[in-house]
Image (cartoon, rainbow, N blue to C red):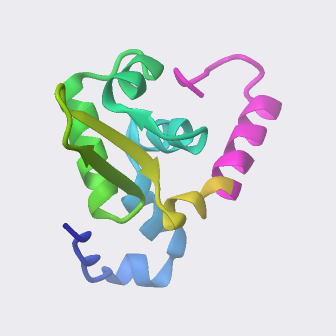
């Protein structure tokens, strides 16, 4: 099933691309999910273990939103037991420089005060 088309941008998003990006990847778990998937393809359980504290419901919801936005691809295999893998799409991979910059900034300026699980 193809990703849903993006919704129309609000006037704030249209005038500020940062606002549009924050709306797309904002929230507690989306950036850590993208960061983990930037390391490679993961199954749901692997991703959940890599993100301590995320509930199964929240992870499924966030993955659904990222998939709908075209940043994450979901591949289901017709196997018993069922297997589903998640990976970044080319659009999702294009966020890597921004995520790397955030990680570098955090390592430089946060000095261990706060670290997100899995990052």
- Please indicate whether residue 32 sits to the left or right of residue 76 in the image: right
Q: Quadrant of the C terminus?
A: top right
Q: Give whichever of 118, 77 is nearer the camera.
A: 77
For residue 116, which quarter of the picture?
top right
Q: Give whichever of 2, 33 is nearer the camera.
A: 2
Q: Residue furthest front?
A: 79
Residue 97 image position (x, y, % from top left): 70, 57
In the displayed structure, 109 sits above or below 62; it is: above
- Does the magenta segment cover residue 104? yes
Total numbered labels placed on residues in the image: 0
In the displayed structure, 55 sits above or below 73; it is: above
Residue 24 image position (x, y, % from top left): 38, 60
For residue 105, which quarter of the picture?
top right
Residue 4 image position (x, y, % from top left): 22, 72
Residue at 26 percent across and 62 percent down: it is 68
- Does the magenta segment cover residue 10? no
- Please indicate whether residue 63 sits to the left or right of residue 40 in the image: left
Residue 77 image position (x, y, % from top left): 25, 43
Residue at 54 percent across and 24 percent down: it is 118
Residue at 39 percent across and 36 percent down: it is 29
Task: Give the magenta part as a residue range.
Answer: 97-119
Q: Give whichever of 22, 75 is nearer the camera.
A: 75
Q: Quadrant of the N terminus?
A: bottom left
């Amino acid at each position: 099933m193809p990703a849903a088309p993006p919704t129309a941008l609000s006037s704030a998003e249209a005038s500020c691309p940062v606002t549009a990006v924050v709306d797309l990847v904002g929230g507690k778990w989306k950036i850590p999910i993208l960061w983990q998937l930037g390391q490679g393809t993961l199954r749901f359980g692997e991703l959940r273990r890599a993100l301590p504290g995320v509930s199964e419901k929240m992870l499924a919801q966030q993955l659904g939103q990222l998939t709908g936005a075209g940043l994450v691809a979901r591949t289901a295999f017709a196997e018993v037991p069922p297997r589903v893998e998640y990976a970044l799409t080319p659009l999702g991979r294009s966020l890597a420089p921004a995520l790397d910059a955030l990680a570098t900034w955090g390592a430089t300026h946060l000095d261990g005060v706060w670290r997100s699980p899995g990052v």
